[in-house]
């Protein structure tokens, strides 16, 4: 599965109503650590069809970033059943992101 671009317009359908666990990556194009983490996020999406992976550009989707209280990027948020279950901040290894979903 490929990484989805998440916006305020598709958030409810893609994330809140997802029947799969979700990893959200809050990022920005100017953020060096975000660019470092991007291939890891793509890898997780490609290797785990049972996980929905989305990216939220904090410059374009300030409302979503504010709703999640994102203060630093990259921020990774794990969601299951429409509820946040875990989060981590900073460029982290793939294993750390997957552990957020108990894998």
Image: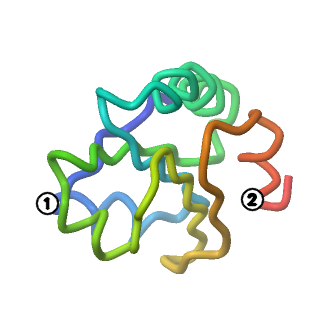
Which residue is identified by label 1? 9
Colour scheme in the image? rainbow
Q: Label 2 vs label 1: CA separation?
A: 26 Å
Is residue 17 found left or right of 24 in the rendered image? Answer: left
Q: Position of residue 10 (x, y in %)?
A: 21, 57
The circle on residue 47 is none
The image quadrant of residue 61 is: bottom left
| Above or below, comparing residue 48 to residue 15 in the picture | above
Q: Position of residue 84 (x, y in %)?
A: 56, 76
Q: Is residue 49 shown left or right of residue 59?
A: right
Task: Please name the residue that numbered disc 2 is placed on.
Answer: 100
The residue at the point 42 percent across, 45 percent down is: 54
Which-is-in-front pick, marks 2 and 1?
2
How many marks do you count on the picture?
A: 2
x then y, percent, for residue 72 = 45, 55
Question: Who is closer to the viewer here, 85 or 45?
Answer: 85
Callout 1 crowding tier (Cα within 10 Å): few <14, some 14–19, many ≥20? few
Q: Helix or strand or loop: what does disc 1 sit on?
A: loop
Q: Position of residue 58 (x, y in %)?
A: 27, 50
Tell me if mark 2 has few (under 14), some (14-19) or many (20+) residues whose alpha carbon lies within 10 angstroms of its own.
Answer: some
Q: On screen, 20 above or below 80? A: above
Residue name at image x 39 percent, y 72 percent: 68
Task: Mark 2 and mark 1 in contact? Answer it, CB < 8 Å.
Answer: no
Vertical placement of residue 31 versus 53, above or below: above
Identify the residue shown where x is 15% and y is 46%: 60
Label whose residue precedes the other's in the sequence (2 or 1): 1
Residue 40, relative to residue 94: is it above or below? above
Towards the viewer: 28 or 100: 28
For label 2, the SS is loop
| x 54%, y 25%: residue | 42
């Amino acid at each position: 599965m490929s990484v989805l671009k998440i916006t305020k317009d598709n958030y409810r359908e893609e994330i809140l109503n997802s029947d799969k666990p979700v990893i959200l990556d809050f990022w920005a194009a100017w953020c060096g650590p975000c660019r470092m983490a991007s291939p890891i996020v793509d890898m997780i999406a490609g290797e785990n069809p049972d996980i929905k992976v989305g990216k939220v550009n904090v410059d374009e989707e300030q409302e979503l970033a504010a709703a999640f209280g994102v203060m630093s990027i990259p921020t990774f948020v794990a969601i299951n059943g429409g509820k946040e279950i875990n989060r981590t901040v900073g460029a982290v290894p793939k294993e750390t992101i997957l552990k957020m979903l108990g894998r």
